[in-house]
Structure formats: C-alpha cells, structure tokens
Image: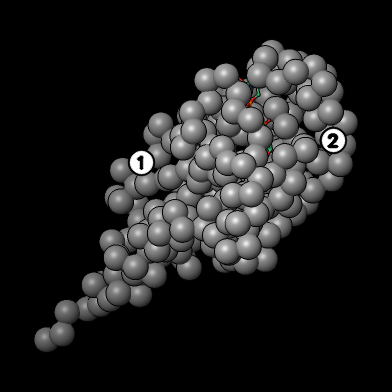
Amino acid sequence: MLASVLVPQSRRRGLMLVMSSPSGAGKTSLSRRLLETEDELSMSVSVTTRPARPGEIDGTHYFFIKEEEFDRMALAGELLEHAHVYGHRYGTPRKAVEQALSQGRDVLFDIDWQGAQQLREAAADDMVGVFILPPDRDELARRLRTRAQDSDAVVAYRMTQVSADVTHWAEYDYVLVNAEFEASLWALRSVLMAERLKRRRQPGLTEFVRRFREPQA
Ligand SMILES: Nc1ncnc2c1ncn2[C@@H]1O[C@H](COP(=O)(O)OP(=O)(O)OP(=O)(O)O)[C@@H](O)[C@H]1O
Ligand SMILES: Nc1nc2c(ncn2[C@@H]2O[C@H](COP(=O)(O)O)[C@@H](O)[C@H]2O)c(=O)[nH]1
C-alpha cells in the first residue's frame, strides 16, 4: 500500500515519529492501534527503572531494568536519550532505532518532552514530533483513574505535572487533541503519510523523474 505512492528507491531512510503528552492522554493506546495497520513502522521499546504494571511484559512494553544497569547503559552511550520522568528513569536503546532507520523503517516513540528535546538535538532531520493534548483536565484525571494501573498517589502526582507538561506543546511539529480516539488515529496516520511523502524523504525522486524525459531519436 505505502509502496504504491512513494517513488520506488532503495535509499529511503526511516523517520522518527515522536509522541509526547501529559500522562494518560492516550499515547500508548494510539501507538498500539497505529502499529496494527502500519507495517513499515516499528515501536521503540524503552528501558525503565519503573516497576512493571500488571500485564506489562518485559521486552514488549518496556525492558524493566535496575538503576545500575540504567547507569551502565547511559554511560556506555547505549541510550539515544534518557530522562527522569514522574520519579523513575526512562531511556531509548540506541541500537534498535539506528538499525531500523538505516533499513528504511520508520520508528514510533512514546517518550516525554525531555527525551523529545534530546532526539531533536541529535537528529532534527529525522524527527517528526506530535504533541497530544487531552480534551481537558477532568477527562485526563478520569482516564488515569479508569486505566486503573497506578495507585491514587501516582495518579495524583502525575496530575500535578500536567500544567508543566503542556507548556512544551510548541516544541512539536504537530499538536492534536485526543478527544475522539478514531479521529486522533486518523490524524496520526495522515501525519505519517504526509511526512513520508516529503521530497527530502524520497531520495529516489531525481532518478524516477528521469523516466519521463522525451525519448531520444
Ligand atoms: N480518545 C480517548 N477517549 C477516551 N479514553 C481514551 C482515549 N484515548 C485513550 N483513552 C484511555 O485513556 C487511558 C490512558 O491512555 P494511555 O495509557 O494510552 O495514555 P498514555 O498517554 O500512554 O499515558 P502514559 O503517559 O502514562 O504512558 C487508557 O485507559 C485509554 O484507554
Ligand atoms: N524520555 C523518555 N520518556 C519515556 C520513555 N519511555 C516512556 N517515557 C515517558 O514516561 C512517561 C511515563 O510512562 P509510563 O509508562 O510510566 O506511564 C510517559 O510520558 C512516557 O512517554 C523513554 O524512553 N524516554
């Protein structure tokens, strides 16, 4: 499907689609659905020192690691970015992302604004940032509570960070309000397609348009 609208070429470099939001706005849910239909998109699986929630699988949702291992990875340069977020440490393993991008696969990130800033500094040309806003504070609190994955204290703490978190919206290329889930999903797919169609992301264009020259007598 994707191949039919992009010019055929072998040198496409993947892009980094980075989603950030206040906690509970919907990044994880949107990522899961996006990945179901986008077969040229891979999820970046982060490392974290946060304990696993019920149902979270090591290596699928996160790599759950100890502080010492986190320090080692950070010092060894094995993390593309890392940050303290809501009392725990989170980071993006470098190798898997670089491998995917060099193979022409796009990579999806669910990371906070600090991580997004670091990726932008390291690889501005490859990064497309999307900031996701909830419809309002009350709905955000409701989502965090009904997700029923965190204690009341954790939910309350994350809610204290909302007003600071949202100040970062202007650092992103796109901003969407995740009110209607299906509409948000459609918007994300549109962003991804538009970014893939950008001229600079289709290095095979010059060669492709040569095909349309007048045949030489
Ligand atoms: N558009 C929506 N309408 C109603 N509920 C939603 C919508 N989007 C997501 N949710 C629900 O909100 C809750 C939080 O969503 P999710 O876990 O995806 O947020 P998140 O941004 O990944 O949070 P975190 O930053 O803490 O990882 C989930 O229960 C999810 O089903
Ligand atoms: N800077 C990074 N932030 C990350 C990474 N992985 C996840 N996150 C962000 O942490 C919070 C909390 O996540 P939760 O799973 O504990 O609810 C959320 O905003 C994520 O986007 C990462 O590798 N780097």
Image spot of residue 135 (x, y percent): 76, 26
Label annotation for residue 161: 2
Q: How many marks?
A: 2
Q: Look at 22% across and 78% down and name the residue there.
A: 214
- Badge 1: how crowded within 10 Å, few (<14), some, or many (20+)? few
How far apart, in angstroms, are the residues tagged by discs 2 and 1? 34 Å
Q: Amino acid at mark 2?
A: Gln
The residue under label 1 is which amino acid type? Asp
Q: Residue furthest left?
A: 217
Q: Quadrant of ligand 2?
A: top right
Whether disc 1's CB lies below 8 Å from ligand 1 is answered no
Taking the image as shown, residue 57 lies to the left or right of residue 146, namely left
Q: Which residue is mark 1?
A: 39
The first of marks 2 and 1 along the sequence is 1
Q: Quadrant of residue 209?
A: bottom left
| Foreground of the two, 202 or 98 | 98
Q: Residue 85: image x %, image y %?
A: 74, 42
Q: For this view, does 201 lie left or right of residue 90?
A: left
Q: Position of residue 164 (x, y in %)?
A: 86, 41
Element on which disc 1 rests = loop
Quadrant in which the C terminus is drawn: bottom left
Looking at the image, which residue is at 67% across and 66% down?
A: 121
Q: Which of 35 and 60 lies nearest the eye of the viewer?
A: 60
Crowd around label 2: few <14 · some 14–19 · many ≥20 (10 Å): few
User: Residue 64 lies in what quarter of the image?
Assistant: top right
In this picture, is 215 found above or below 41?
below
Q: What kind of element bears circle 2?
A: loop
